[in-house]
Image (cartoon, helix red, strand yellow):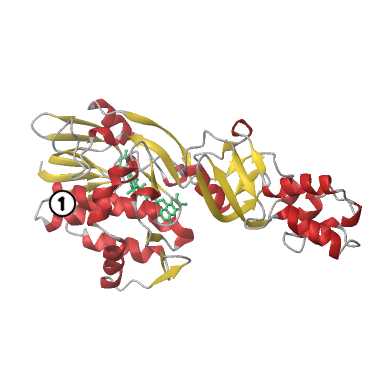
Amino acid sequence: MKTYDVIIIGAGAAGLSAASAALSNKKSVAVIDMGNVPARKIAVSGGGHCNFTNAAVAANKYFGHNPDFTRSAISKISPNDILNWVKQHKINWIEKTSGQYFCKETANDFVNALISDAKKADFFMNNKVEDLDKNELFRIKTNKNFYTAKSVIIATGGISYPVLNVSDVGYKIAKKFGHKIIPVRPALCAISTKIFSSELSGISLDVEINIGKEIIYDSMLITHFGLGGPAIYRATVRNIDADIHINLLPNTNVFEWLKIQKQQNGKKSLANILSSKLPLRLARWLTQKSNKNIADYKDTELKLISHNVSDIIVKKDDFKLYNLQSAEVVRGGVSTEQISSKTMESKLCPGMFFAGEVLDVTGDLGGFNLHWALSSGRIAGENA
Ligand SMILES: Cc1cc2nc3c(=O)[nH]c(=O)nc-3n(C[C@H](O)[C@H](O)[C@H](O)COP(=O)(O)OP(=O)(O)OC[C@H]3O[C@@H](n4cnc5c(N)ncnc54)[C@H](O)[C@@H]3O)c2cc1C
C-alpha cells in the first residue's frame, strides 16, 4: 500500500486548503472524507453564496480559550489574499455590508476552485475515519480501508449541523494523543426564550445587544420559540455566562423622546407613537395593547415603558442555545494550548497537524470562520 507524505482527514475548507498547500510543496497527498462530495458545508454557507472572508479579520473576531492563537495564520493569509485567489479563479464575488465578501452566483464556484487546486491529491470519499495510530508512520483506519502517511492533518470540522454528516473523530484522535478537549457547544445560533410573546414571531428589527462586556449592533428576529437573526447569532458565539440586554431603540433616549411626544402629540395613543420607530405589533405588545393616549400616562409610567424598550433583559438562566442541529458552528474543540500557532503542528505528537473548526477557535458571524479554516489549513499544509 502506498505511503503518502501527507494524509488529510476532512475535505472541507481547511482540508482542501491544506491539500493544495502540501501539493505546492511537492508532497504526495491523500484526502479522506466520509461524505460523497467535498466541502458540503461551504456549499450551504452564506445562504448558498458562502461568505468566504471579511475585511475586518483580526484576532478580536475570534473566540475560544486563546483568540491570540489565530494571529499568526491570519497575518500570513489576509482577506486580500483570499480575495485575490477568488479573482484568479474567476469567481464572481460581491461585497455586502461592511467588507463581507460573498460568491455572487453560488458557493459551488468556491468549492470547485478549491477542488481544482487540490486535484492532484488522491481523494478517498465515503471513507469514515474511525481511528489513527502512530508508529514510525501514521496509520489511519476507515470503515473501508487502512491508509499510511508520514504526516497527518486533522481537519474534521465541528459537530454542528449534523444533517451534513459530521463526526467527533477529530476530538477523539486528539484526546488519544494527549490533547485537551474544550467542551463543545452550539454557537452562531438562535436561542429559545419566552421573553417575547410568540404572537410577535416574524418581526425583525435593528437592536443593540449587550452581553458581558460586548456590545453588538445588528438585526434581531423574533421567532415562535425565541430569538434569532444576526444580532443573536453573534451573541451566542461570545461567552454566554451573562444576561443578554436588548435595546430595541439604540441611539434613542426613549424617555426624553416620549416626554416630548406627550407635550406635542398628547392625543395620540402611546402604541401609535411607539410605532413610528418600532413595528406596530411590537409597539402594541409593549403597551399591553392599550389604546390610552400618551397624555394620560404619568411620567413615571413612561419611564417604566422606556426602560422596557431600551433594556429588555434575558436572564442567563432563562434562555437556551437553540441546538447543534441548526447552529452554524461550535464553540470549543481541540485546545490550542498544545498546538503551534506558527505551523498548526501538535506539540505532543510530531507530524500531526490540526486545522479549521476542529480547533477551539470560533469566528464571529461574517466570513471569519471560513477565513480561519482556509488560513489555518494553508499553514498546516505548508508545514506538514
Ligand atoms: C448553515 C451554515 C452556514 C455557514 N455560513 C458560513 C459563512 O457564510 N461564512 C463562514 O465563514 N462560515 C460559515 N459557516 C461555518 C463554516 O462553514 C465552517 O466553520 C467551516 O466550513 C469549517 O471548515 P472545516 O474545513 O474546518 O470543517 P468542515 O467544512 O466541517 O469539513 C470537515 C470535513 O471533515 C469530514 N469528516 C468529519 N469526520 C470525518 C470522519 N470521521 N471521517 C472522514 N471525514 C470526516 C466531513 O465530512 C467534512 O467534509 C456556516 C456553517 C453552516 C452550518
Task: Identify which residue is drawn at 39% across, 50% down.
Answer: 61
Residue 51 x %, y %: 41, 60
Task: Identify which residue is drawn at 14% across, 56% down.
Answer: 23
Residue 143 or residue 31, whichever sits in front: 31
Mark 1 — residue?
Answer: 382
Residue 257 x %, y %: 75, 59
| The image quarter in which residue 279 lies | bottom right
The secondary element bearing badge 1 is classed as helix
Q: Is residue 85 visible?
A: yes
Residue 87 x %, y %: 29, 72
Left or right for 47, reference 30:
right
Residue 350 x %, y %: 13, 35
Residue 262 or residue 93, whichever sits in front: 262
On whether ligand 1 comes within 8 Å of the CB at mark 1, the answer is no
Residue 226 or residue 235, whichever sits in front: 235
| Image: 115 above or below 138 | below
Left or right for 311, reference 70:
right
Left or right for 80, reference 163:
left
Q: Give, as a three-letter code, the residue at label 1.
A: Glu
Q: Is residue 40 visible?
A: no
| Image: 337 above or below 83 | above
Q: Residues within 10 Å of mark 1 (few under 14, many from 20)?
A: many
| Image: 142 above or below 79 | above
The tally of labels here is 1
Task: Identify which residue is drawn at 28% across, 43% down.
Answer: 69
**Where's the C terminus, which quadrant?**
top left
**Where's the N terminus, which quadrant?**
top left
Task: Identify which residue is drawn at 88% across, 50% down.
Answer: 297
